[in-house]
Image (cartoon, coloured by chain):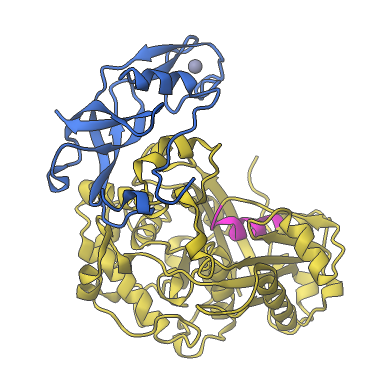
Chain colours: A yellow, B blue
Amino acid sequence: MGRKPFNREIAIAGVAESDLGHGVSLSILQHQALAAKRALEDAGLRHTDVDAVMAVDFLGLPSLQIAEYLGIKPRFTDTTVTGGSAFENLVEHAALGIAAGLCEVVLITYGSTLWSDRRRVVEGGGVDPRMPAAQFETPYGDLSPIGAYALAAARHCYEFGTTPEQLAEVAVSTRNWAALNPRALHRDPITVEDVLQSPLIASPLHRLDCCVVTDGGGAVVVTSAERARDLRKPPVYVLGSAFSSTHLSISQMENLTQTGAFESGKSAMSMAGVKPSDIDVVEIYDSFTISVVCALEDLGFCPKGEGGRFVEGGRLGPGGELPTNTSGGGLSYNHPGAFGIFLIIEAVRQLRGECAARQAPGAELALVHGIGGWLSSHATLILGK
Amino acid sequence: MSEQTRPVPKPDRDSAYYWAAARRRELVFQQCNECGQFRFYPRSVCPFCLSEKFEWHKSLGRGAVYSFTVIHRAPTPAFRDRVPYVLALIDLPEGVRMMSNVIGCDPGSVQIGMPVTVDFEEVSDEISLPVFRPE
Ligand SMILES: [Zn+2]
């Protein structure tokens, strides 16, 4: 059975971050409340208009907690725990709920105090001791999640001749976007040499190949296109969505150089009736530079194995052919643990033309790609004006 | 568990036999009685056919490096005196892949495709970890 298209019936009406960065004195719930309040203001909606809550914060019962905290009594909830791609997935679930008449105004939230908590990170990077990875990966000092992405990067270099210099190009382009974003954590330009000179963390990944760690929260309001039409901001339509997971633990990933982005990208673009060359702006979860290289290949922006060459010469940066991670990404803007929601926020702002100095020219169609776990879960959204 | 203690696997109903074998310096994999496929990590059903019937098979433990990374930043203080060390994915002839360390050589000499053979590293009174050395 084929996918039923959304036919421009689903729209994102509001987006916002909380206060981001280092030294922000907000709790996990406060981050979500602040982001939710701002996203509802952005949409021109009140909290009493919300009838569905989809929260992810890795606390106990997040959707119920956030609904209660904000005084919302939802008739539909979802908490999808697939790591950093969960929010792309939740937009899809919101769309399905709205299309089925289960709800009309969906509030999606995320909040994290990853930076403040960093000294309390438990052994094994938070892997539950009952999970197989706690027995078969953590004891080997897997430096989760960096080790997993480094293994993928090393294999990519081996199979395709991708170089550390090429990986570094992703960090450089992304930093150039961050320089244009007043909200970004790191705004000073860097060079390929700077990346290669930064300490090696897990070969071939250097410190500047890795995302930053911050506190922060985000919120996204999804509603029917009909409802969105009369709201404060022009609707951004959800044109396509798809999810794919091939494994959880990195040692269970069959082919380290082909990710679930291949399936999710193909399916989301087919649903939207678009191809990679139609996309004006790309937001990919850049946990690490290799994540972007792999995803660009698997999403079809370049042939498999060509990703390293593709990102050379500032192609992804300001003024480049394929504006990518225009906020400055997880690499330079902010990264409170599950970055997927910030990809959506940035894509919506780009499509509305709200991005001032970092505005991608002629942004009418955006591809948003979330990645969760250890290259484990992939969720792609196609958004359009 | 104190931060200074190296993380040690806690055997469960799926893995008790595997860890007991490792303690005897044997690397074992489950082989499905229905479809014949090997699997790793240990689990109660075959991921190829969902059969619950299996036998433990003793591996020769000779494999090849599928990918590896040299870890320079210790995940926890317990690993501080070990860096830099090699974290690797090892392909075994049974068709299974496992995460491990490549030890007994300069980390800079490890290469993808390099043949390796199993060894065992005692990490507690009960647990020995399968690790690999260059052949
Ligand atoms: Zn079987």
Q: Position of residue A198 (x, y in %)?
A: 25, 70
User: In the picture, residue B25 is in which quadrant?
Assistant: top left
Instruction: Out of A146 and A265, give the one closest to the viewer.
Output: A146
Instruction: Out of A159 and A351, give the one closest to the viewer.
Output: A159
Q: Is residue B32 above or below residue A17?
A: above
Asked whether B106 falls inside the magenta stretch, the response is no
Our reading of the magenta stretch's main secondary structure is: helix
Q: Position of residue A334 (x, y in %)?
A: 48, 74
- Residue at the spot x=57%, y=79% of the render? A24
User: In the picture, residue A8 is in which quadrant?
Assistant: bottom right
- Residue at the spot x=76%, y=65% of the render? A66
User: Which quarter of the rendered picture does the N terminus of chain A lie within?
Assistant: top right
Left or right relative to A384: residue B116: left
Please say whether residue A284 is visible from this viewpoint.
yes
Asked whether A85 falls inside the magenta stretch, the response is yes
Q: Is residue A254 above or below residue B1?
A: above
- Residue at the spot x=49%, y=42% of the render? A248
- Residue at the spot x=44%, y=62% of the render? A276
Q: Position of residue B114 (x, y in %)?
A: 17, 35
Left or right relative to A88: residue B2: left
Q: Position of residue A172 (x, y in %)?
A: 30, 75
User: Which quarter of the rendered picture does the C terminus of chain A lie within?
Assistant: bottom right
Please say whether residue A104 is visible from this viewpoint.
no
- The span picked out in magenta is A83-93
